[in-house]
Image (cartoon, rainbow, N blue to C red):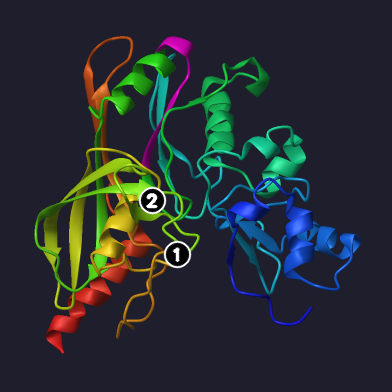
Amino acid sequence: MPTPPEPFPIPAELAGQTLAAILRLRLPGQSWSQVRKLVETRRVLVDEALCQDPARRLKEGDVLEITAKPFPVHRGETVETLVIRYLDDDVVVVEKASGINTVRHPAEREWSDGRRELSPTLEDLTQRAIAEQLGRPKHTLPRLRTVQRLDKDTSGLVVFARSIPAERALGAQFREHSVIRRYLAIVPGFVPPQTFTSHLVRDRGDGRRGSGSESQGKLAITHVSVFERLPTHTMLLCQLETGKTHQIRIHLAEAGHPICGEKVYGTQPLVETGDPPRLALHATELGFVHPVSGANVHWEMVLPLDLQGFLVRLRRLEKR
């Protein structure tokens, strides 16, 4: 196959069609077996995540990408390296690495364990780690219930509910915006302390999420303060008041300061220290009222080593 086409946001007129069907439209002359082989050989991403189901139906705004080489089998986070920060009968808090999806797409829920292991999600690894820690077979554990998600390339703290009462109580806290969620983000230029407020829509006109009219969008509020001023960049502490998809990434990109490593909502000027290792966004704080005990619980997670190294390189620019 020649050079793959550019990433393709799914327009409204193609929403609901299968991945295989849309691939044939994007790759004229390719047969059904050829596009299925692309999927099977790990050459297709949807919203920056590997997709291996040719029958998956895509939604408006999904971004389809065909890679030049097979997407590597995930070797980063494993059960052995996963850090569980807190575990009881109702909740589990874990540290998420960059490069792994929080949860599996609904179309992939019926995958076998063997297939899941080729591209495990944080949910998969967490359940296996709990089973090992408790010394129990995985199938005897209550399923994890999703109350929070982080983007694939974002690292940081994530909580899952382990019981129905916890799921309901935590869900209510997230809806009421009472959960403490703070992120570190490294951006080019200087961004002063401020609050970003907009209404986010699934398609701002170019197939990407972004700010739109109040009547069409969902309210999104992000508070930012300066965590560290660097010679050519700023490390920001971002606090979510609401929690919409890609909210911090969109607000900073629309302000003219896309997060270093951003691939969807804009590009950054070249950095003398080299490209960032990945999206420079990290969920550093998480706090909420325990859904059963009522205690205030809070965790912090330091910046991962890859972003620490990038930060060190940015600091050195001042000495030149």
Visible residue check, residue 50: no
Q: Which span of residues is magenta-colored?
A: 157-165
Residue at image position (68%, 44%) is 117
Q: Position of residue 270 (x, y in %)?
A: 33, 83
**In the image, is residue 101 above or below residue 131?**
below
| Residue bearing mark 1 | 264
**In the image, is residue 212 above or below residue 289?**
below
Does the CB distance between marks 1 and 2 fall below 8 Å? yes
Q: Which of 122/42 is in front?
A: 42
| Residue bearing mark 2 | 246
Of all residues, the one furthest to the left in this rendering is: 193
Q: How crowded is the residue under tag 1: few (<14 C-alpha within 10 Å), some, or many (20+)?
A: some
Q: Quadrant of residue 295?
A: top left
Q: How crowded is the residue under tag 2: few (<14 C-alpha within 10 Å), some, or many (20+)?
A: some
Of all residues, the one furthest to the front in this rendering is: 215
Taking the image as shown, residue 161 lies to the left or right of residue 194, namely right
Estimate the spatial distance between the alpha carbons at disc 1 and disc 2, rounded to whole Å.
Answer: 10 Å
